[in-house]
Amino acid sequence: MAELPPRAIAWAQTMAGHPGDALVRAHRDPGAMLGLMAPVLREQREAWEAEHLVPGATRALGMGNRARAEQPDPERTCFERDRDRIVHSSAFRRLAGKTQVVVYPSDHQRTRLTHALEVAQVATSIARGVGVNVTLAEAIALGHDCGHGPGGHASEDAFDAFLAEGYDHGPWGADVVLAPLNLCAETLDGIRNHSWSRPTPATVEGEIVSWADRIAYCAHDLEDAIGAGIASVADLPSGVVELAGATRRQQLSTFIREVIGTTVATGEIGMGAELAGALAELRAFNYERIYTRPESLAQSEAVVAVLRALVEFYLEHPERLPSDVGGDPVHAAVAYVGGMTDRFAFETAVELLGWRRDRLPRPA
């Protein structure tokens, strides 16, 4: 039997931790000491919110407003439970394998998962700055794209063909994908309505996520495009550079501060006209140079073809669906294909449908 290397032996020796006088430590030597007399429980944090959050902020209370009643958690507020449930869900994990802008992203390009994390950072920065519920904003941001299918926004076009009401990733995420988690109504509302074409969210935290989503993707999609050689800083409109900067860091800082400042000045979540115009100009630039360039449109067409073929296969062969996917046959087929990662969907098309690899979506 081969000998274990020293590092493996050292790691194995920590199996039981490091015993102290009255506890077991993670490390050999004692660390910092806390002057803690009792755990900080849910009710104390709810009391802190009641005292410190600004008027109009959403306060956690007890079990939360859930479709199925639950006992309150002793340690966590209702929105902390929502955030934890989203982070530990398979739908959230699968975002790591779903397109943000390009399929088969490189190691340094965003996926839907990294996008969700960046939206959460922007949303929590704004929420802290205006004194509202940071945890609710974080939960909405982390879950806002869980309804996306493989291949990015093209999946919505693909699934539209099968659903009378159409496929919108916000409502689908809230009402289908995340429904088993029994999240609070406020969290689901923010996820359902984060897109600007949807009704106004019921909470200020939901409105904050709507802004955070647009701020984050405008800045980071541009950064990815520059890194891939699709665009360059020199191409940026002068108005964007002058008002918001040329880098992702500058743009995020500028837009986050603008939302905070405007909200403090007006009492409504928003931006002043000048910087809102710069954000709109940046988004328009991204649409022209990234999202609607010929390579991206070809990628979208290939995504639509693959996903429609997969749904049609499962409609013809419902017995091939996993046993835990039930309900209306059309809904079940769309839900199953919509939950796939890019790679799994494309490989399934090859293996199950005999799809030629030269017909699969290509990095744009």
Image (cartoon, rainbow, N blue to C red):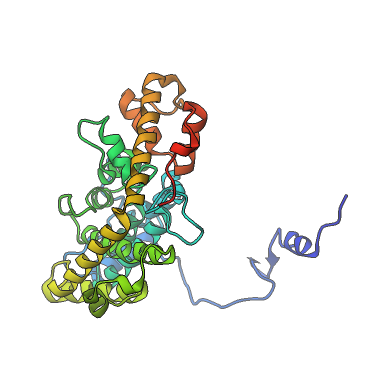
Dividing the picture into quadrants, the one containing residue 10 is: bottom right
Position of 265 compared to 70: left or right? left
Against 200, is 307 above or below? above
Relative to the observer, which residue lies in front, 226 or 43? 226
Q: Position of residue 23 (x, y in %)?
A: 64, 66
Report the number of discs: 0
Relative to the observer, which residue lies in front, 243 or 121? 243
Q: Position of residue 215 (x, y in %)?
A: 28, 65
Q: Position of residue 247 (x, y in %)?
A: 35, 74
Q: In the orientation shown, which residue stands out farthest toward the bottom? A: 242
For image coordinates 40% across by 52% down, the residue present is 364
Residue 310 can be seen, yes or no: yes
Position of 156 compared to 204: left or right? right
Residue 180 can be seen, yes or no: no
For image coordinates 25% across by 72% down, the residue present is 255
Position of 65 compared to 90: left or right? left
Position of 79 compared to 39: left or right? left
Against 55, is 164 above or below? above
Q: Position of residue 97 (x, y in %)?
A: 46, 48
Against 329, is 25 above or below? below
For image coordinates 17% across by 49% down, the residue present is 198
